[in-house]
Amino acid sequence: MAGLPRVTARVSCELCTKHGINLSHGIAFEMFQTIERMVPEPIIDMGGSIERLRGHLQNGPQSDLPHAAQLRKNWYFLKSAIRLATRDSSAQRHSLV
């Protein structure tokens, strides 16, 4: 239904849920959830957090799913973003997730 006039993706999801239709999350949301689970806040041990995330993406229970493959493909940029966000003292709470 999303895409019809005056029906946004959120409204479409709400209507589907009312009718018992469970929609899968998109790949971007799955990537967000993986990072949120694996990179705690506040980060006390940045190196350990990065290595834990890398291990999860390579050998974790969902390592064969598309979102994990996408994060592995962009590993350099993900690691750089985590390092940059932890150094930014003006970053808002939960800015890593």
Image: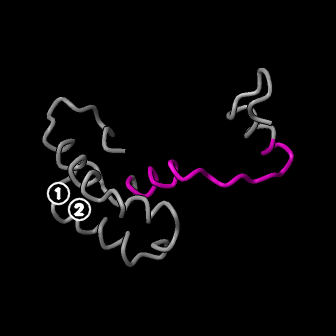
| 6 w.r.t. 21: above or below | above
The answer to whether residue 20 is above or below residue 38 is above
Toward the top, the furthest residue is 6
- Please tell me the numbered disc located at residue 46: 1
Q: Which residues are magenta?
A: 16-35
Badge 2 local density, few (<14 within 10 Å), some, or many (20+)?
many
Residue 82 lies, in percent from the top left, at 24, 49
How many numbered marks appear? 2
**Residue at the outermost front position:** 73
* Mark 2 element type: helix
Amino acid type shown at disc 2: Ile
Q: Which quadrant of the figure has residue 18?
A: top right
Q: Give the quarter of the figure containing the C terminus.
A: top left
Name the residue rendered at 17%, 43% in the picture. Answer: 84
What residue is at 52 percent from the left and 48 percent from the top? 29
Taking the image as shown, residue 4 lies to the left or right of residue 93, namely: right
Does the magenta run of residues contain 19?
A: yes
Helix, strand or loop under label 1: helix
Categorize mark 1 by other alpha carbons within 10 Å: few (<14), some (14-19), many (20+). Answer: some
In this view of the protein, which residue sits in the foreground, 4 or 91? 4
In the rendering, which numbered label is found on residue 50? 2
What's the residue at 29%, 36% (across, down)?
A: 93
Query: What residue appears at the point 71 percent right and 52 percent down from the top-left corner?
Result: 23
